[in-house]
Amino acid sequence: MERKEFIKDEIKEEPENPFNYYLLALELKKEGDLSGSLDLFNQLIERFPSYIPTYYSFADFLLEIEDDIKAKQIIELGIIRAEGVGQTKALHELKQMWELNF
C-alpha cells in the first residue's frame, strides 16, 4: 500500500487524531502537492489548535514558498499556543525560527 493511502486509511479510522493529518500534510508536500499540503496545514491549525508540531512545520513550509507574512503569523500563533500548553521545547524552536528568519 502506498504511504499516502495508508495515512488516509488511518485518518478514516481515527478522524480525531491530528498526527495523521499532520503526516498527510507532510506527505503531500513531499509529493509536490503544495496546494493540498497548504490546505491541510490550515485545516490542522483551525481544527487542532493545540497540536503544537503543526506550527513549526507549517511555518517552515511557508518560508520555503516565500510566504513570509503568513509564516510570521503562524510562528507568532505557535509561540502563544506552545506557551499556553507549556511545551518549552517547541516554544524554544519556534523562537529560534523567528530569530533566524525575521
Image: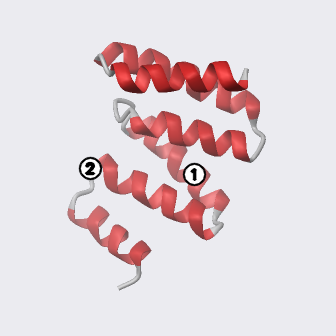
Judge the density around disc 2: few (<14), some (14-19), many (≥20) Cα neighbours within 10 Å: some
Residue 30 lies left or right of residue 44; in this view the side is: right
* Secondary structure beneath label 1: helix
* Secondary structure beneath label 2: loop
Q: Residue at x 49, y 56 (%)?
A: 25
Q: Amino acid at mark 2?
A: Asn
Percent x, y of residue 3: 40, 75
- Quadrant in which the C terminus appears: top right
Disc 1 to disc 2: CB gap under 8 Å: no
The relative height of residue 50 versus residue 27 in the rendered view (above or below) is above
Q: Amino acid at mark 1?
A: Asp
Nearer the N terminus, badge 1 or badge 2?
A: 2
Judge the density around disc 1: few (<14), some (14-19), many (≥20) Cα neighbours within 10 Å: few
Where is residue 58, by image quadrant? top right
The relative height of residue 66 versus residue 24 in the rendered view (above or below) is above
Q: Residue at x 66, y 58 (%)?
A: 35
Specify the farthest residue to the bottom: 1
Where is residue 89, by image quadrant? top left
Percent x, y of residue 34: 66, 59
Q: Residue at x 41, y 51 (%)?
A: 22
Alpha carbon distance from label 1 to label 2: 17 Å
Q: Residue at x 45, y 36 (%)?
A: 46
Residue that label 2 marks? 17
Percent x, y of residue 5: 39, 77
Percent x, y of residue 100: 67, 24
The chosen color scheme is: secondary structure
Residue 51 lies left or right of residue 35; in this view the side is: left
Residue 1 lies left or right of residue 77; in this view the side is: left
- Quadrant in which the N terminus appears: bottom left
The relative height of residue 90 versus residue 8 in the rendered view (above or below) is above
Q: Which mark is residue 39?
A: 1
